[in-house]
């Protein structure tokens, strides 16, 4: 019998091989994929997030653990899809127009995927029109926008205006993040959530989906 | 006090002596801002420095000493001299898209750029000829950590390698450090007065990596550069955005004579920095180029500049600068207001210009107590 706590431990220690072997073993032992996710991967990533927030873990540890979780989720994906088991939610993400920074966004994606989110990444330098078009065609719970520059931060506001103009604002919750972004800015532009880091992004996203 | 030259003003404040007034220079000043202030689109960077009587001019490595190969002009995609592919959008500096080294095999055959090419020093030579002795001519280089991370290995690979494959970082660090040591030696031979190393070691929340990793991977290359500077009697400045409280002592131990920009966006208070380590290094900052210089009124900028000087100017050891650079979003009139406020409130002795000149000594953050 696979102890799912061992998967959590592997995530916390960033031991990708152990996490993958234990996840495979759990699937072979017919442990439901959702249970592996909820009792193995997510608690491990939550602890990693807590350690990051308290300053005990830094970017290297976060990336190693996030990657281990993402790879394990790839193993679970076919089973989750086959069983028609819903994801935690559907998240659309991109770096705003004029900005090509992506490490922060990519860490958020890794953490979201590890927590069972289905993530669509539009990449960098995404225009308000492109965000709107994808929101219109998809069924996303949350749109997350990253801006790393003071001068591109206003493009988060422009995208929200574009969503309103297109009649799409109520279709998704909107989150913003990035070095110059603050809660005050998020409130000013009418975003639903602001996250200062990847760990907080997962918490806020989960809370926003819970609200809706 | 007798009026000093810009160079004298900076060197005196770096030694924690009070010059005639608080010095000022910037890491970068955007052309749009410069042109708007000078009402002259043909004026050069050096013309602007002279026009505004700024105390130093910086030869910025990426824009003045690196070579690039254009790969897609329409999309602004280029290969930099290290082999990394970068894309330029709204900034002058571009952002990495693809690193040069994707495997250890790539590293085995990697040929670094040649620091000894004469053309790299053309701009520095021109500025030394024009300003030597009058203004500080600063040779700038991007941090070894930044180049190794962004141009050579890619940031995700670099951070993961800190845990999984430290040898590859050591190899890449050695390549970049050797280039920079040679580059700076050449700059000093040409006549640079100060060395300035940019590249962040921290984010808004705190350091990118632990103290252990900062000491193991990031600080040693900078320390070698600082040692070169000091062997030639030249100060060495270190830039890092973000909250550096947990690692400020490592930066100082590595040999920084000045720290820029004491990032207010990351909660760095320049008064607190003055109280805790302002006697060890020159503080360079920190009028907000995220808020007041971009969206504030000239009065707000003036007030904030005055406050920076009030908090950190006493006894020297302050160069009043923006909190990063004068980027294209800065209102030209606000930058002018900042410079004017430095001239008005930064005359030594400062007591003459303030009703209540105090240096706050309260501890607001958790940071190493060793110093």
Image (cartoon, coloured by chain):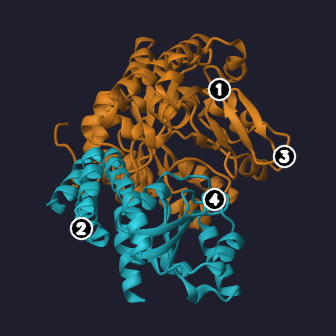
Chain colours: A cyan, B orange
Q: How many callouts does the rendering have?
A: 4
- Please indicate whether residue B328 sits to the left or right of residue B322 in the image: right
Q: CA distance from mark 1 to mark 3?
A: 32 Å
Q: Residue at x 48, y 38 (%)?
A: B199
Mark 1 vs mark 4, foreground winner is: 1
Q: CA distance from mark 1 to mark 2?
A: 52 Å
Label number found at residue B40: 3
Mark 2 vs mark 3, foreground winner is: 2
Q: CA distance from mark 1 to mark 4?
A: 36 Å
Q: Residue at x 31, y 72 (%)?
A: A34
Element carrying mark 3 = loop
| Residue named by callout 1 | B81
Chain on which label 4 sits: B
Chain on which label 1 sits: B
Which of A162 and B117 lies nearest the eye of the viewer? A162
* CA neighbours of label 1 inside 10 A, class few (<14), some (14 to 19), many (20+): some
Residue B288 drawn above or below residue B276? below
Q: CA distance from mark 4 to mark 2?
A: 63 Å
| Residue named by callout 2 | A31
| Residue named by callout 4 | B334
- Please indicate whether residue B97 sits to the left or right of residue B271 in the image: right
Element carrying mark 2 = loop
Q: CA distance from mark 2 to mark 3?
A: 72 Å
* CA neighbours of label 3 inside 10 A, class few (<14), some (14 to 19), many (20+): few
Q: Is residue B316 visible?
A: no
Residue B150 drawn above or below residue B350? above
**x, y (%) of residue B62?**
63, 32
**x, y (%) of residue B358?**
31, 54
Mark 1 vs mark 3, foreground winner is: 1
Q: Residue at x 39, y 19 (%)?
A: B224
């Amino acid at each position: 019998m696979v102890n799912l706590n061992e998967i959590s431990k592997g995530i916390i220690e960033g031991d990708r091989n152990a996490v993958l072997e234990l996840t495979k073993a759990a699937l072979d032992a017919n442990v439901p994929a959702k249970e592996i996710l909820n009792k193995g991967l997510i608690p491990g990533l939550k602890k990693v997030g807590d350690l990051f927030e308290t300053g005990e873990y830094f970017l290297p540890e976060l990336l190693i653990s996030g990657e281990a979780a993402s790879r394990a989720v790839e193993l679970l994906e076919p089973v989750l899809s086959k069983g028609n088991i819903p994801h935690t939610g559907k998240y659309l993400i991109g770096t705003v127009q004029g900005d090509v920074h992506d490490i922060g966004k990519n860490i958020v994606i890794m953490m979201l995927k590890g927590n069972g989110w289905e993530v669509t990444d539009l990449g960098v330098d995404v225009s308000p029109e492109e965000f709107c078009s994808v929101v219109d065609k998809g069924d996303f719970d949350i749109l997350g926008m990253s801006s790393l520059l003071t001068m591109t931060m206003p493009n988060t506001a422009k995208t929200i205006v574009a969503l309103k103009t297109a009649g799409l604002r109520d279709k998704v919750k909107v989150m913003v993040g990035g070095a110059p972004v603050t809660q005050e800015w998020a409130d000013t532009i009418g975003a639903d959530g602001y996250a200062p880091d990847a760990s907080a992004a997962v918490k806020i996203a989960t809370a926003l989906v819970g609200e809706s | 006090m007798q009026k000093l030259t810009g160079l004298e003003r900076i060197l005196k404040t770096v030694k924690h002596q009070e010059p005639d007034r608080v010095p000022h220079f910037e890491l970068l000043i955007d052309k749009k801002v410069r042109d708007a202030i000078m009402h002259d689109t043909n004026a050069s960077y050096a013309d602007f420095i002279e026009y505004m009587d700024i105390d130093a001019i910086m030869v910025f490595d990426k824009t003045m000493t690196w070579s690039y190969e254009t790969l897609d002009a329409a999309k602004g995609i280029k290969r930099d001299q290290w082999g990394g592919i970068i894309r330029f959008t709204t900034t002058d500096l571009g952002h990495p898209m693809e690193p040069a080294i994707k495997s250890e095999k790539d590293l085995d055959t990697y040929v670094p750029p040649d620091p000894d090419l004469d053309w790299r020093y053309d701009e520095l030579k021109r500025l030394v000829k024009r300003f030597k002795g009058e203004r500080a001519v600063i040779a700038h280089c991007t941090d070894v950590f930044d180049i190794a991370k962004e141009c050579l290995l890619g940031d995700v690979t670099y951070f993961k390698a800190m845990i999984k494959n430290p040898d590859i970082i050591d190899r890449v660090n050695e390549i970049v450090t050797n280039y920079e040591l040679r580059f700076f030696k050449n700059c000093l031979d040409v006549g640079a007065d100060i060395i300035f190393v940019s590249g962040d070691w921290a984010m808004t929340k705190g350091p990118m990596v632990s103290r252990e990793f900062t000491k193991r991977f990031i600080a040693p290359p900078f320390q070698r550069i600082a040692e070169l500077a000091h062997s030639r009697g030249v100060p060495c400045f270190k830039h890092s955005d973000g909250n550096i409280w947990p690692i400020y002592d490592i930066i100082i131990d590595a040999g920084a004579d000045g720290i820029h920009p004491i990032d207010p966006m990351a909660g760095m208070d320049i008064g607190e920095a003055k109280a805790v380590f302002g006697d060890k290094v020159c503080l360079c900052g920190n009028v907000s180029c995220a808020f007041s210089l971009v969206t504030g009124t000239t009065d707000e900028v003036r007030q904030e500049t005055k406050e920076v000087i009030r908090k950190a100017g006493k006894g020297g050891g302050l160069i009043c600068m923006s909190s990063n650079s004068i980027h294209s979003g800065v209102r030209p009139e606000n930058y002018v207001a900042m410079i004017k406020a430095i001239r008005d409130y930064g005359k030594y002795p400062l007591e003459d210009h303030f009703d209540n000149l105090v240096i706050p000594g309260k501890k607001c953050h958790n940071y190493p107590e060793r110093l």
